[in-house]
């Protein structure tokens, strides 16, 4: 049975996860927004998604573009968790995972590092 949690509480957890990002990395993040959404309409079980151009792929031509998007999918995360402690842990893992994509780290390397 999925964990029940208000959207406000879930958004607080995402904010707390973002606060865990080391200051040097947070300062290096550029033109990116983190959003909480209920589900990904194409892949309802997806926990998070990075959409944009990774910092490592940006060239001197980069500019005048909409911000990259990191979506954290609330209902999908709540579906797989047993209690609030699980939600806290999964939110941190998902936020770090998607921010890593912003820095150009692919899924294979994230899995190798334990950030599945």
Image: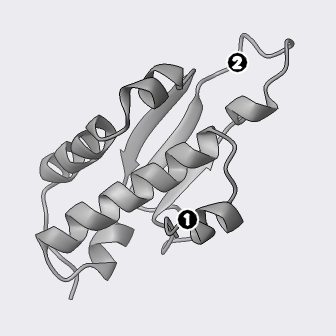
Q: Secondary structure at mark 1?
A: loop
Residue found farthest to the bottom: 1
85 horizontally vs 49: left or right: left
Where does residue 8 sit, x and y in percent of width and height? 15, 46
Asked where in the image residue 64 lies, by quadrant, the reply is top right
Residue positioned 55% across, 54% down in the render: 49
**Up-down relation of residue 26 to residue 77 (above or below):** above
Mark yes or no: residue 72 visible: no
Where does residue 10 sit, x and y in percent of width and height? 20, 53
Where does residue 41 sit, x and y in percent of width and height? 54, 63
Quadrant housing the N terminus: bottom left
Mark 1 / mark 2, whichever is N-terminal: 2
**Up-down relation of residue 60 to residue 44 (above or below):** above
Residue positioned 39% across, 60% down in the render: 93
Residue positioned 45% across, 65% down in the render: 47
Mark 1 or 2: the one toward you: 1
Mark yes or no: residue 70 visible: yes
Determine whether label 1 and label 2 are within 8 Å by CB. no
Camera-side residue of 94 and 38: 94
Q: Secondary structure at mark 2?
A: loop
Which residue position is annotated with label 2? 65
59 horizontally vs 96: left or right: right
Which residue position is annotated with label 1? 113
Where does residue 31 sit, x and y in percent of width and height? 57, 21
**Up-down relation of residue 78 to residue 31 (above or below):** below
Q: How many tags in the picture? A: 2
Residue positioned 13% across, 63% down in the render: 5
């Amino acid at each position: 049975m999925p964990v029940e949690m208000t959207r406000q509480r879930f958004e607080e957890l995402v904010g707390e996860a973002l606060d865990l990002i080391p200051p040097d990395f947070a300062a290096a993040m550029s033109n990116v927004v983190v959003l909480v959404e209920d589900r990904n309409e194409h892949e309802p079980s997806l926990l998070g998604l990075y959409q944009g151009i990774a910092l490592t792929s940006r060239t001197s031509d980069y500019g005048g573009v909409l911000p990259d998007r990191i979506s954290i999918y609330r209902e999908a995360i709540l579906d797989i968790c047993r209690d609030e402690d699980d939600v806290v842990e999964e939110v941190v893992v998902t936020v770090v995972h998607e921010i890593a994509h912003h820095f150009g780290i692919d899924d294979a390397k994230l899995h190798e590092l334990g950030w599945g």
